[in-house]
Image: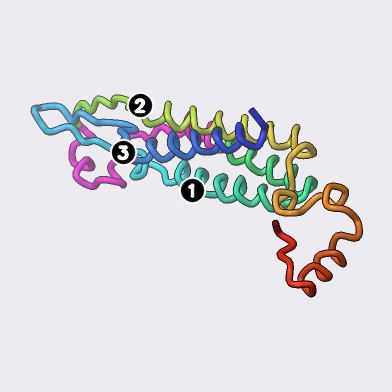
Amino acid sequence: MRPQRVVDLLALVALVLLGLSAYLTWVSVNPGTGRVDEVFNGYSITKAPVALALAALVAVIVTKLAGTALRRLLGALVVVLGAIAVAVALLVRPDGPELSRIRPVLSAVLADQVIETGGPAPWFALGGGLALVAAGLLTVLTAHRWRTATQRYERDPAASGADQGADQWKAIDAGEDPTL
């Protein structure tokens, strides 16, 4: 499989995982004494994974149009975005006062016994961040082998003959179809 396709696949995986981390449970809080658990999804805790995923997706799309040097620069940017997503997944663990700021209902409960339980969202954010780091590294290492955007649509002058342009005009003038 070509490196471009692998980078596309890794970027898609990262987008899905980071997007899922926004909607899955990041942390749930059991206030005790028979109260209903408060569930916080990833987007209510931090908006960073979604923003990082969208920024990385734009960078990967732009690499399709860029030259080798800009491609490497964008790959390094994707590595940094992935590293930030990994850091967010590992370090963002809200405490009681922060959760009560997000959901004021908890502010009266925090003096009681509060039990916090982590959800699966940070793991999805971690996986998405690692996929971005891999995509960025692969881009940096293989940028010189990628096809440029216009190569796909250009004709090979050696295959078509050097003087074929003039011959085509002569054929059109003679009433022939030079495309056949």
Q: Which residue is mark 1?
A: 51
Horizontal side of residue 128 vs 22, given as left or right? right
Circles 3 and 1: CB atoms closer than 8 Å: no
Residue at 21% from the left image edge and 36% from the top image edge: 38
Local crowd size for mark 2, using a 10 Å CA cut-off: few (<14), some (14–19), many (≥20):
some
Q: Amino acid at mark 2?
A: Pro
**What is the x, y in percent for residue 113?**
20, 26
- Label 2 sits on residue: 120
Residue 173, placed above or below residue 3: below
Residue at the right extreme? 162
| Image quadrant in which you'd find residue 7 | top right
How far is disc 1 from disc 2 in space, using C-alphas?
19 Å
Highlighted range, magenta = 85-111
> Which one is earlier in the sequence, the residue at label 1 or at label 2?
1
Does the magenta segment cover residue 145? no
Circles 1 and 2 in contact, beta carbons < 8 Å? no
Q: Which of pointers 2 and 3 lies earlier in the amino acid sequence?
A: 3
The disc placed on residue 104 is none
Instruction: Give the CA distance from mark 3 to mark 1.
Output: 15 Å
The residue pinned by badge 3 equals: 41
